[in-house]
Image: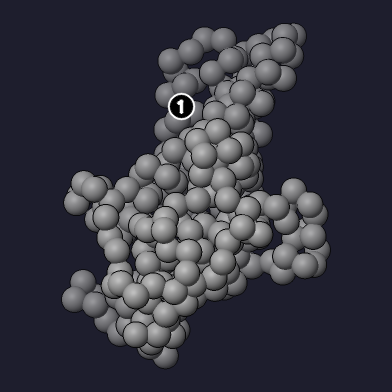
Amino acid sequence: MSPEEWVPPRNAVTHRRRSTLGKFVNEAGFPVYSGFWWKLALPEVILPVHLAVAVGTGAWAASRAGSSWTTVAVGVPLGFFIWTLFEYTFHRWVLHHKRHPLLRKIFWNGLHREHHMSPDMKDLDHHGIHLAVSLPLVLLLVGSVGLATESGWGLAVAAGWILGYCLYEALHWLFHSADPARGLGKLAPIHRLSAAHTVHHMYQAKKNYGFITLFWDRCFGTYLPLEETRPSGGKGYRRRVEGHDEKDRGPSTKGGSES
Ligand SMILES: [Zn+2]
Ligand SMILES: [Zn+2]
């Protein structure tokens, strides 16, 4: 089966039908992203909301720290650094988790697989984590840290972590919407990250789990530059999409692998 035959149409309104649960879904059974509800998951909406929360959290940390700006100056970058490890860990070991059936069903099948099914990097359907999920979680985090700590350190770290999340949403959006040869995509650091994310999507899903930095990929040995990849075709496409065979560096003669 060729990739074109296998990859379903993306959320095209003309293909939508009602699922047994009453939701509009496309031919692949994924939700059709239309209407006000899904607008709340667009990066244009997510970013200003969470940036405002990050700034508010930073201001709260500063007010607790009083005249000691060290708390904010060190705490925020520390929180940002913690985010980078979080995004790597969550992407690699949670979103791509395959062994435990329930975890696989929730995270890979339910949250991440559809994103990997986009037949190319340009994904005009790209949405971030829905505001209805991310905002309560972030507010819960800030509230818990605020209640559990008395100095400004915890809040400063939380503010940095939220800033990391904002950068993740912004960059991931850019990777799937911007032309890498133009505008922001031409900036060397963004170009490098975008190329790495292209490897993760189009060639080897077990490489380049980082979004805003490749530091942890280098540490854990999962970094692969785009120049070192070779496109595969035919059935290899499906294995790439499923992302479970690191040996899939060329046209495959075997069926899809799901370890
Ligand atoms: Zn992935
Ligand atoms: Zn992506």
Asked which quadrant contains residue 177, the reply is: bottom right
Q: Secondary structure at mark 1?
A: helix
In the rendered view, would you say 65 is above or below 113? above
Q: Nearer the viewer, residue 95 or 209?
A: 209
Q: Nearer the viewer, residue 84 or 165?
A: 84
Q: Nearer the viewer, residue 27 or 43?
A: 27
The N terminus sits in image quarter: bottom left
Asked which quadrant contains residue 137, the reply is: top left
Relative to 85, is 101 on the left or the right? left
Residue 30 on image: x %, y % = 34, 72
Q: Is residue 26 visible?
A: no
Query: At x 37% / y 51%, what residue is drawn?
Result: 96
Relative to 117, is 185 on the left or the right? right
Query: At x 61% / y 42%, what residue is drawn?
Result: 214
Residue 196 on image: x %, y % = 61, 54
Q: Residues within 10 Å of mark 1 (few under 14, many from 20)?
A: few
Residue 222 on image: x %, y % = 51, 44
At label 1, the amino acid type is Gly
Query: At x 42% / y 55%, what residue is drawn?
Result: 246
Relative to 124, is 178 on the left or the right? right
Disc 1 beta carbon < 8 A from ligand 1?
no
Relative to 114, is 106 on the left or the right? left
The C terminus sits in image quarter: bottom left
In the rendered image, which residue does mark 1 sit on? 143
Residue 76 on image: x %, y % = 65, 25
Q: Nearer the viewer, residue 116 or 158?
A: 116
